[in-house]
Amino acid sequence: MTRLKLARALAAPLPSTGAIEARTPDDGDRATLGEILYLAYLGGPDQEENDAIEGRAEIDRTMNGHYGPYLPAASFVTSDEEGVVGASLVVMHLEHVLLAHAVVHPRAQGRGLGAALVTKSLAALAAEGHREVLLAVHAESRAKGLYERLGFVRVP
């Protein structure tokens, strides 16, 4: 499967998305985020984790700096009446800001939460003076359309 690198200039106006309540993820969110990561990617081209335990390990790698320093000020989780349902996690990978994960629990997909979380991260990064954010996505992933709607474009 082909992985694409997408970028978004942070100087460009941010899209209008629905307002959500969100907060910075904390260590108590890690297990839930691992489950969400696993379930959100299940059966799709982005699936790399085979269960919630592997999902948790990936969340730990991300938040522990395996891919570069974790940026909690630009990372968010949102909840519904049943608990945390989505997250956007951002790291500094080499000299680039990287949207490492943007995931929404299947029960909460289709409500605009993914777009709102990513937009919230973009706004936080722009406020900190960052100029661009990168991400990687499989060409066959349905998330690719979301990222394109949010202004990400393919880069070599």
Image (tube, rainbow, N blue to C red):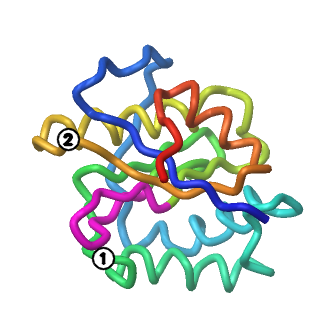
In this image, 153 relative to 94: left or right?
right
Asked if 74 appears above or below 30 in the picture, the reply is: above
In this image, 55 relative to 141: left or right?
left
Which residue shows up at 70% across the image and 50% down it?
Answer: 105
Disc 1: which residue: 68
User: Which region is colored magenta?
Assistant: 89-100
User: Could you say which quadrant of the image residue 107 lies in?
Assistant: top right
Asked if 116 appears above or below 62 in the picture, the reply is: above
User: Could you say which quadrant of the image residue 42 lies in?
Assistant: bottom right
**In this view, which residue lies farthest toward the right?**
43
Residue type of the residue flagged with mark 1: Gly
Using the numbered discs, state the Cα–Cα distance from disc 1 to disc 2 in whole angstroms: 18 Å
Q: Measured from the top left, where is residue 153 in percent x and y? A: 50, 36
Asked if 109 appears above or below 56 in the picture, the reply is: above
Which disc, if any, is residue 131?
2
Whether the magenta-drawn stretch holds residue 98 is answered as: yes
Asked if 113 appears above or below 3 in the picture, the reply is: above
